[in-house]
Image (cartoon, rainbow, N blue to C red):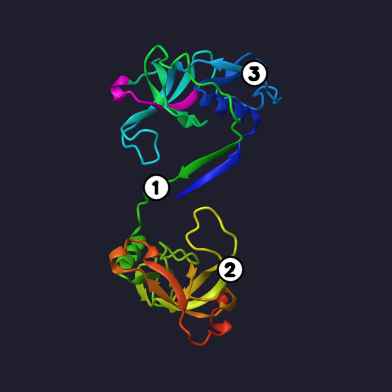
Amino acid sequence: MQFDYTRSVGPVLGRFLTALRGKRILGIRGSDGRVIVPPSEYDPVTSKPLTEFVDVADTGTVTTWSWVAKPLEAHPLPHPFAFALIQLDGADTAMLHAVDAGSPDAMYSGMRVRARWRGETIGAITDIVCFEPGENSETPTTASDSSGEPITILTTPVKLEYQHSASFQESYYLRGLKEGRLIGGRTDANGKVYIPPRGANPTDGRPTTEQVELPDRGIVTTFCVVNVPFLGQRIKPPYIAAYVLLDGADIPFLHLILECDPAEVRMGMRVEAVWKPREHWGYTLENIDHFRPTGEPDADYETYKHHL
């Protein structure tokens, strides 16, 4: 999952980011005399606004760290590194950043590090590529200043990657999708059919051990016409998001309804799956690109009113 998060930064964080663009690091002094980095808008002791900015060095000391042996795509470095809390010289608090030490054997609390800056800075914490072992700063004394328009808006890409261990029921469901089949689960011949299958029937707690193959046709129970555009949207509005109840199932799932005028969608409308080309199939419900109307008569409300 990935999206861009855009926010206004306010005067304190804005000044911190503007200083980073000039290859300077700013802290802010609290009521107890401590220098806080990154700067906080409000005093952690009195909760009053803080205004006294303080320049700190781009060198410091590692207070604690954790080694990242297998970096992900969104991590700051493509090779193994450490995330560390670094107390910069002149600061009284530690800031989180990456340390490029080469190996975990080279990392230790108390290690002296210095910032490695990007060649071209934009006013973001990523202007510091990482920290590296070293006692003295390598930032030129002629580093660019912080003049120009102050930073007021920050756009941060947010990316989440996770690994999920599929249950027995999820496994046969996902394997079925890879083969172009829709497989639900139930406790026995008298049990309700759930798709995606669940580990247990939610009404009585019995395990759903029986597999049931379902057709890729069904009805729309409820729906929403999406009219509002948003960042990362794959389909131009308006389009339809609907709950589809497959024939033989007892619970609907959410999917797209296309090849249909949004003004024509309705509860009880008969729909069928449109599958992606087989070479694009994986272990995912996204193998079905969308559902479309079949043209058959609508289902009677009494046949699905308990599935809304």
Q: Mark number for residue 30?
A: 3
- Determine the residue located farthest toward the bottom in the rendered image: 297
Residue 162: mark in rendering: 1
* Alpha-carbon span between mark 2 and mark 1: 30 Å
Amino acid type for the residue under numbered disc 3: Gly
Q: Residues within 10 Å of mark 2 (few under 14, many from 20)?
A: some
Q: Quadrant of residue 183 in the image?
A: bottom left
Of the two numbered discs 2 and 1 in the rendering, the one whose residue sits closer to the viewer: 2
Which residue in the protein does label 2 denote?
225
Amino acid bearing label 2: Val
Q: From this viewpoint, is residue 246 visible?
A: no
The residue that appears at 49% across and 17% down in the rendered structure is: 88
Residue type at mark 1? Tyr
Q: Secondary structure at mark 2?
A: strand
Q: Secondary structure at mark 3?
A: loop
| Residue 34 in sight | yes
Asked if residue 21 is positioned above or below residue 291 in the image, the reply reads above
Q: Which range is magenta?
A: 95-106
> 196 above or below 158?
below
